[in-house]
Image (cartoon, rainbow, N blue to C red):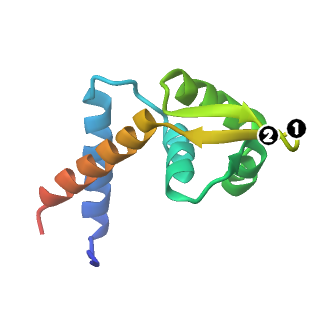
Amino acid sequence: MSTDLRPIQAIKLWHDVNLSLVHDEGQNFSARQWAILLTIYLEPPPHTVRGLAHKLNVTKPVITRALDTLGAADLVSRRRDKEDGRNVIIQRTVKGALAVERLADIIVSKSRTLSV
């Protein structure tokens, strides 16, 4: 399914989705935190701090800080790689999957309200 949006519609959709996230009773996450979370859930595992930093072109401390917040909200979990203790493996959680699904529902809902 392809949807052609005019630039102003795309910006309106982005605004409406973000406004819904701001008003949501749950924790508010930054765009960077959402980008990391979505990368973890949309791309096949395994995910590591090093791999995410490379993929998103940010430093490992940036990933670590975001994962601290996402982990505190139980949206991801971390564990040391048993084969290489230098690597930290990022794992999905049920609560994280539900958060991503909720975001998708918000996007779909808000896209339906766009004027043509």
Q: Label 1 amino acid?
A: Arg
Q: Is residue 52 above or below residue 21?
A: below
Q: Is residue 53 above or below residue 25?
A: below
> Residue 62 at what x, y percent from top left?
70, 35
Which is nearer the eye, 51 or 78? 78
- Seen at 56% across and 59% down, the residue is 43
Residues at badges 1 and 2 in contact (C-beta under 8 Å)?
Answer: yes
Residue that mark 2 sits on: 81
Q: What element carries label 2?
A: loop
Which is nearer the eye, 56 or 37? 37
Which is nearer the eye, 21 or 94? 94
Snapshot quadrant of residue 33: top right
- Seen at 65% across and 40% down, the residue is 90
Is 58 positioned to the left or the right of 104 in the image?
A: right
Q: Is residue 75 above or below residue 111?
A: above
Q: Label 2 amino acid?
A: Asp
- Which is closer to the viewer, label 1 or label 2? 2
Count up the numbered dots. Answer: 2
Residue 86 badge: 1
- Seen at 20% across and 58% down, the residue is 111
> Residue 36 at what x, y percent from top left?
57, 45
> Residue 106 at what x, y percent from top left?
25, 47
> Residue 67 at what x, y percent from top left?
62, 32
Rate crowding at label 2 as few (under 14), some (14 to 19) or many (20 or more) other CA atoms within 10 Å.
Answer: few
Q: In which quarter of the image is the N terminus?
A: bottom left
Between disc 1 and disc 2, whose residue precedes? 2
- Residue situated furthest front in the rendering: 82
